[in-house]
Amino acid sequence: QLYYCSSHMPLITLTSDIGQKDYLAGAIKGQLLQMIPGCTLVDISHELTPFNYPQAAYVCRNTVKNFPDFTFHIVLVNLFENRHEHLLLAFHNRQYILCADNGLLTMITEGKPEMVIGLPTDEPVAKNALYVTRLFGKSIQSIVKGESLHSIGIPDIHILEKNPLRPMLGENWIEGQIIFIDHFENVVINITREFFEEQRKGRHFTIAFKRDEVIEKISETYADVPEGEKLALFNSAGYLEIAINKGNAAGLLGLQGYSEKQSAHLQNRLFYQTIRIFFD
């Protein structure tokens, strides 16, 4: 099985929850450029909300599947939530994912990855984001040089597994959870077009959420409704999205301004805020 195409310079994506206000995002890129000269670095996002696994999984999952084979995806999210003696290097669907052993990996891959290698960490060294970057960079160096994955770390290591948020399902309804609020405060639900049609079976539907708001059709674009009106559509990743044409859907759902606040109360509101689709 082919694990790297040596004719290409490495392509590396960076996704993190470290923000852009200080030097760290730049320093991480500097470390990688020193270690792997000629590599191409692509920033996905550095503004993920800490400890919000469904959000991080949604962003990473829909990033990974759009990149060329053998891209390296470094995910610096919730790095130090738990004490671990190793980090993870996974190979899945001809893509590499490097992340902490915190459960996020199985949420991104929606199941057990094809191959997982444990990357041991050195005890006396301070475990910070730059240390983690160097360890990931060293692993990428080894793969680019043609070393086998099994020689880089511990094969088939036991990992922490978390399940992606799945919609709840009844005979005549689906209950979905909000997994992401985008820059325009459109609200993304963990219901894909495929899952929706499978459960709908051609029936009429009503999308319902708090304040007795309902939507009874799927739009193709935001412009399908007048300015200020609510709508539902499937976004470019194939997930159900509740939006307002030139408006703020997150506010409509009681989550306005969430991204500026990190309180536990608002975290829980994001995780457990739901919408229901009724079929008849």
Image: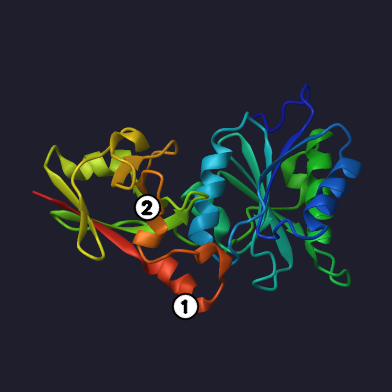
Based on the displayed image, in which of its 4 quarters is residue 193 positioned? top left
In the image, taking residue 145 as reference, residue 65 lies left or right, namely left
Query: How busy is the neighbourhood of tag 2: few (under 14 within 10 Å), some, or many (20 plus)?
Result: many
Residue 161 visible to an observer of this rendering:
no
What amino acid is at disc 2? Ile
Q: Quick check: 190 left or right of 6?
A: left
Q: Residue at x 88, y 68 (%)?
A: 125
Depth check, front residue: 36 or 18: 18
- Answer with the quarter of the image where residue 64 lies: top right
N-terminal-most mark, 1 or 2: 2
Compared to residue 3, the image places residue 97 above or below, namely below
**At 87% across and 49% down in the image, what residue appears?**
31
Give percent across and percent down for residue 121.
Answer: 80, 63
Asked whether the residues under the numbered discs 1 and 2 touch, taking CB atoms below 8 Å apart as contact, a structural biologist would say: no
Residue type beneath disc 1: His
Residue linked to disc 1:
265
Q: Position of residue 138 (x, y in %)?
A: 84, 47
Q: Tell me the quadrant of the picture where the N terminus can be found.
A: top right
Is residue 156 visible from the viewing direction of this image? yes
Query: Quick one: 223 or 273, which is closer to the camera?
Result: 223
Question: For this rendering, which residue is in front, 150 or 124?
Answer: 124
Which residue: 45% across, 59% down? 163
* 118 on left or right of 138: left
List the single residue furthest toward the front.
Answer: 227
30 in relation to 8, above or below = below
Query: What residue does disc 2 label?
Result: 189
Dot 1 surroundings within 10 Å: few (below 14), some, or many (20 or more)?
A: few
